[in-house]
Amino acid sequence: MISLSGTLSVYNPQTRLTMFESGPEHSSGSVVFIGGLLDGYHALPYLPHLGRAIAEQLGFSLIQVMLSSSHMGYGISSLQDDVRELDVLFTFLREERAKTRLFIVGHSTGCQDAISYATYGQHRAAIQGIILQGPVSDREFMASSIDMYGKYLRVAQRMINDGKAQELMVREVDVAPVTAYRFNSLASVGGDDDMFSSDIPFEKMQALFGQVKNPLIWVHSGKDEYVPEHINRVQLVSQLAAASPTSLGAIVLPDANHAISDLPSQTKFCEVVVQFMRQVLATVEQFEKSQQQSFHGLSL
């Protein structure tokens, strides 16, 4: 049973979207967790452990965010919508809560959100680091697990060509209501959500991740049930990290599933996150000191 104590706050008064903060709420540092498809609050079993680790070792709070795409809303939303709502969240955190040290942990499709925010977000320069946990290809998983994948994709693309991109597809397509646009985004080659597929040419990966200026780390699960068996996981992990100029490395948790359900892997994941954050924070502190020394050395 997942249990966290904290404060629920409305960060977007217009849409009544909320955030849940646990740990030292008055800290200037926070880790913002962005979940994947169907996720909401307390969606991942490692969140209590992560919250304790960053609070006790770094003095950071953990913030879980509710987006319009959370739970069953992903099918009528988009990465662009998520970025706009995250803009509102980070404006709130910086202006109302005086947060100055911000990190993102993206899980699953939340990794697409993290990359999108680092590329287009209004406050992307204020994000000191990004942890990508369970970055997998929705397209490759859908192709291997949905019997009517090809048919549904053709229907979605026909609807888009007919100017019906934002209309809903038939109910049988997904557990959640889904527009032609979002199905195509998740399921097609080159769709907006297609970031982590094994067959993306390396040059395209470089173009995609080359826009990210924030330090990041990749955390993959060795027993991720959303990665089809035919995928060369070792090669994919290596390729994704190599295509990211700001990557500080890639970690594989050999016994972990997609959600990191086993306790030893959760412990290792928290250690990786804390170590990454310490490395980034030390680099930022060193840079700020050098800037101050340069300023004081100026002769006016």
Image (spheres, helix red, strand yellow):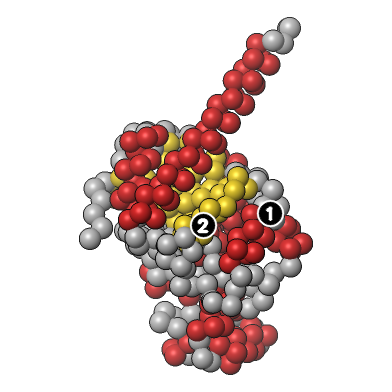
Q: Amino acid at mark 2?
A: Val
Kindly report which numbered mark, 2 or 1, lies closer to the viewer in this rendering: 2
Q: Nearest the camera: 139 or 30?
A: 139
**Looking at the image, is mark 2 or mark 1 earlier in the sequence?**
1
Report the number of discs. Answer: 2
Give the labeled residue for mark 2: 252
**Residue 299 appears in which quarter of the rendering?**
top right
Q: Is residue 280 left or right of residue 35?
A: right
Q: Nearest the camera: 68 or 194?
A: 194
State how far apart marks 2 and 1 are (Cα): 15 Å
Q: Residue at (37%, 35%) from the top-left corner?
A: 57
Asked whether residue 166 appears in the rendered view, the answer is: no
Q: Residue at (41%, 49%) from the top-left corner?
A: 268
Rendered location of residue 41, percent (x, y):
33, 59
Q: Residue at (23%, 54%) from the top-left corner?
A: 3
Where disc 1 sits, the SS reads: helix
Q: Nearest the camera: 252 or 27?
A: 252
Rendered location of residue 199, percent (x, y):
68, 72
Q: Residue at (63%, 64%) from the top-left corner?
A: 236
Q: Is residue 195 left or right of residue 275?
A: right
Is residue 237 depicted above or below 37 in this figure? above
Is residue 273 depicted above or below 99 in this figure? below
Q: Is residue 12 left or right of residue 103?
A: left
Rendered location of residue 216, percent (x, y):
58, 47
Mark 1 closeness class: few <14, some 14–19, many ≥20 residues within 10 Å:
some
Give the labeled residue for mark 1: 242
**Residue 155 appears in which quarter of the rendering?**
bottom right
